[in-house]
Image (spheres, rainbow, N blue to C red):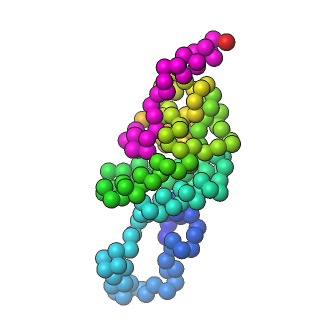
Amino acid sequence: WSAALESILGEDDAKWVDEEWMPRGLSATTLRSILEFKLRMPKTVSPRHIVERVSELAAESSPDEIERPLTAIVRHLLENWQRYSQEELDILAELREREFLPAALNERLDREALYAPSDVYKAIRYKGFVSQVPVVALIPLRLGTSNELLDFLGLPSEPATSVIVAHLKHCIA
């Protein structure tokens, strides 16, 4: 157990091993070997846990409430992105269909809705259309270092030219 893992997985007891029943010393090493290698119990957050946790958060949180726990999850994804196997990426691909992303409209957080990745735009060049479409509002996803994850999730980079024109008209008005 660690605070970092709890910030990603949440406090659900089903995802944690009660360390009180764990043996100490050499027996602990043997048990750990059995759990990790024989039973293939993960020693870190699995992609399935991430998808389940994001789904939980999206179901029970407002855009304001989801920001902190989702930021921890996204940072974990970014830090581990290069390590995921194709099988793990296939599991994470389920996030493409979930409405879990907070977004800003006209640079203000939309406090009413969470968005599916395909319905919210990357923050790159957002100044050219911010008044017309939702732009991802989660800080780690607004940084240039997250582009591979954003592409994987399917966030569009720019809206149609007509949307950009509508934004320019909005700015002039």
Vertical placement of residue 135 versus 171, above or below: below
**In the foreground, 112 or 46:** 112
Residue drawn at 33 percent across, 82 percent down: 34
Instruction: Count the marks.
Output: 0
169 inside magenta stretch = yes
Vertical placement of residue 59 versus 102, above or below: below
Query: Does the image show residue 81?
Result: yes
Left or right: 28 in relation to 126:
left
Left or right: 145 in relation to 72:
left
Q: Quadrant location of residue 89?
A: bottom left
Secondary structure predominantly adopted by residues drawn in magenta: helix
Query: Does the image show residue 3?
Result: no
Vertical placement of residue 97 versus 1, above or below: above
Q: Quadrant location of residue 109?
A: top right
Give percent across and percent down for residue 43: 39, 69
Give percent across and percent down for residue 172: 63, 11
Give percent across and percent down for residue 151: 40, 40
Residue drawn at 49 percent across, 54 percent down: 73
Residue drawn at 40 percent across, 58 percent down: 91
**In the foreground, 101 or 18:** 101
93 inside magenta stretch = no
- Magenta span covers which residues? 147-172
Give percent across and percent down for residue 67: 59, 48
**In the foreground, 71 or 119:** 119
